[in-house]
């Protein structure tokens, strides 16, 4: 008894069904792994190995594990690694608000990578400004933030951009430029000129030195205040709450929450 040959199209349908089954299984497994990572992350238990397993054959949303790994690196204060992960995530074409979240976290990681307490040389100041300008440009792309605030697409991105502008201004004018801003300086210089002909020059010199010392003290105080403001900036964006809100950006929340 001869068996009829199975049509070739049946084999094709079986192969297609098998491929779909495999793809569905991989996608379901990816969802389970990612869900497990998110649950652990919310409890403060960071398990990057789970997400690293999703870096290969990770479709759709191939940027997602890089974003989540960036969050882990940020929480561990490994800001250079966070920058690398967020940059990679951004290169994989995230869409909508997810693009904005990645940009905000990338810009923040760049800000945190600056050691504000050790900007003691001109080179270190210049390097810090370069980093801040790059972070600023990341936020301005696609108008998530704008130069003057008009027409920006995200309030958190705009606020961060404005805070970066403030830090840049402080780095460019670290001593407050008291010679221009001190209303008493002109009067002091005038007094110096009037007293230059006084016979008691030693006393005048002493008074001038005292004023110079006072000015240096004011400059030092201003510089310390600016450093404190920079630290306040980091505290503002780096503070964490408890539970699910622990992944939020300061009081604004949201951008550090894994997907």
Image: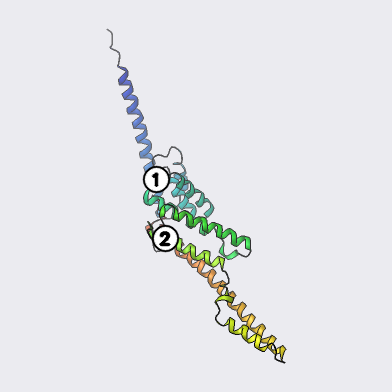
Position in image of residue 216 (x %, y %)? 62, 77
Q: Is residue 9 left or right of residue 102?
A: left
Position in image of residue 244 (x %, y %)? 37, 57
Viewer-proximal residue among 214 and 41: 214
Marks 1 and 2 sit apart, C-alpha to C-alpha, by 30 Å
Q: Is residue 186 above or below residue 240?
A: below
**Mark 1 near mark 2, Cβ–Cβ under 8 Å?**
no
Quadrant position of residue 121: bottom right
Position in image of residue 80 (x %, y %)? 54, 53
Looking at the rendered structure, the secondary structure element under dot 2 is helix
Nearer to us of marks 1 and 2 is 2
Quadrant position of residue 129: bottom right
Position in image of residue 196 (x %, y %)? 69, 87
Question: Which residue in the protein does label 2 denote?
Answer: 158
Question: What's the residue at 63%, 63% (across, down)?
Answer: 122
Question: Which residue in the protein does label 1 denote?
Answer: 34
How packed mark 2 is, by other alpha carbons closer than 10 Å (few <14, some 14-19, many 20 or more), is many
């Amino acid at each position: 008894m001869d068996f009829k040959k199975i049509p070739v199209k049946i084999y094709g349908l079986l192969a297609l069904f098998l491929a779909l089954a495999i793809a569905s299984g991989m996608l379901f497994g990816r969802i389970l792994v990612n869900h497990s990572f998110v649950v652990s992350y919310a409890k403060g238990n960071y398990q990057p190995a789970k997400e690293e397993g999703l870096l290969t054959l990770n479709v759709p949303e191939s940027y997602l594990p890089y974003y989540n790994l960036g969050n882990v690196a940020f929480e561990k204060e490994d800001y250079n690694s966070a920058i690398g992960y967020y940059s990679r995530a951004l290169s994989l074409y995230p869409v909508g608000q997810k693009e904005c979240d990645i940009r905000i976290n990338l810009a923040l990681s760049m800000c945190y990578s600056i050691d504000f307490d050790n900007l003691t040389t001109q080179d270190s100041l210049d390097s810090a400004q370069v980093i801040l300008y790059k972070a600023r440009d990341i936020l301005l792309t696609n108008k998530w933030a704008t130069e003057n605030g008009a027409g920006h697409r995200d309030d958190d991105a705009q606020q961060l951009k404005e805070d970066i502008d403030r830090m840049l201004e402080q780095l460019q004018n670290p001593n407050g430029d008291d010679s221009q801003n001190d209303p008493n300086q002109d009067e002091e210089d005038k007094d110096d000129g009037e007293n230059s002909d006084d016979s008691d020059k030693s006393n005048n010199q002493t008074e001038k030195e005292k004023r110079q010392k006072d000015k240096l003290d004011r400059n030092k105080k201003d510089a310390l205040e600016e450093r404190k403001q920079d630290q306040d900036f980091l505290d503002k964006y780096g503070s964490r709450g408890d539970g699910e809100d622990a992944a939020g950006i300061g009081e604004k929340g949201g951008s550090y929450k894994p997907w």
